[in-house]
Image (cartoon, rainbow, N blue to C red):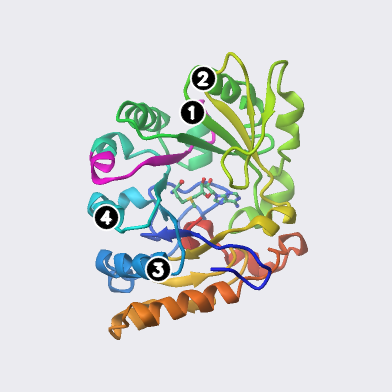
Amino acid sequence: MIDAQGRRIDYLRLSVTDRCNLRCLYCLPPTGVQPKAHGDILRYEEMELLVRAGVLEGIRKVRITGGEPLVRRDLVQLVRMLSRIPDLQDLSLTTNGELLAEVAADLRKAGLRRVNISLDSLDPDTYRRITRGGELRRVLRGLEAALAVGLHPVKINVVLLRGLNQHEVDRFVEMARSLPVAVRFIELMPLGEAYRRHEDYFLPVQWVIDRLGPGWHPVPGQGGGPAVYWGHPDAAGTIGCIAALSEHLCARCNRIRVGAAGEGYACLSRPPVMEFRSALRRGADLTTLRMLFRKLVASKPAGHAMARRHPALRRRLMAKLGG
Ligand code: SAM
């Protein structure tokens, strides 16, 4: 699908639940948010049909996300269903990793190729503080399991937080040296809980780039996504930086999002522009769903406009919109 700006849209981020087992302080309020009723969340069969329609319209990459996707029961089953869709070239998962160790092998067997693990601290206390209760030990076990079962590549996503994990950048760089993982530093966006605290916590990725020691060199053309990568002759892994706030990235945006209740998002900073659920429950066929995908893509704005700090950004929770 080509949008009004001439961008090729071939990447769908599919949220499978709006529930999360963590409450990261820049993402969700301490008490969480009211989850949607069970019946409002798309069933796996509905998701599969939706993805099939998207693939017929040119979607080639699907990332399963949430909420925390691994809190949804029997996610392995969905992975199995999606991995069988012809022409879907890349099926991946984004998780906080807390529940990964138990299911990594089954996910791999079901057809998952790769995984991104969100991990904002390598210190158990800081990790608990940022996630409001998470247990680092579990995530590290999840990471180990992902590597052991051959999920590849494994990417570690670190949201840079001034005064919270800033002092751990060197440890994360060390991780990229010793493990075959891509450690990616991501700029905090003024969405959800981060809207209020953005000025306190925001740290530009340039801060990391300026600290990379001798030997680290840019690796051109890796990934094809928003990250810019650095390699090192002695490193098993790589470092990536995602300047999430920069609107330059929008010129290369290739993605759409579908929330757990079937809401279609054309841009992560905007409200949903349409919803697939009622169409699915009215018995929509592939032709109708394909038309809805085209409509979604046609409504993609040129840029995210987050710099304008519209107060509505406070209601755009990454955990709700398939972050
Ligand atoms: N629970 C899964 C996980 O932790 O990866 C998937 C959903 S989570 C919302 C996806 C990613 O969004 C996480 O890496 C999280 O750090 C990131 N995120 C949430 N709010 C953010 C914000 N305001 N700015 C940047 N990243 C954010």
Residue 84: assigned label: 4
Residue 56: assigned label: 3
Residue drawn where x is 46% and y is 79% of the image: 292
| 248 lies left or right of 43 | right
* Residue 51 drawn at (x, y percent): 37, 65
Instruction: Say which label, 3 or 4, has the lower sequence index.
Output: 3
Residue found at the very far front of the displayed protein: 87
Determine the CA span between mark 2 and mark 4: 32 Å
Determine the CA span between mark 3 and mark 4: 14 Å
Instruction: Say which label, 2 or 3, has the lower sequence index.
Output: 3
Determine the CA span between mark 4 and mark 1: 27 Å
Instruction: Say which label, 4 or 1, has the lower sequence index.
Output: 4
Q: Is residue 115 magenta?
A: yes
Q: Can see residue 225?
A: yes
Residue drawn where x is 36% and y is 26% of the image: 144
Near mark 4 (Cα within 10 A), the count class, few <14, some 14-19 or many ≥20, is few
Near mark 2 (Cα within 10 A), the count class, few <14, some 14-19 or many ≥20, is some
Near mark 3 (Cα within 10 A), the count class, few <14, some 14-19 or many ≥20, is some
Which residue is identified by label 2?
236
Which residue is identified by label 1?
181
Q: Amino acid at mark 4?
A: Arg
Instruction: Say which label, 1 or 3, has the lower sequence index.
Output: 3
Callout 1: SS: strand
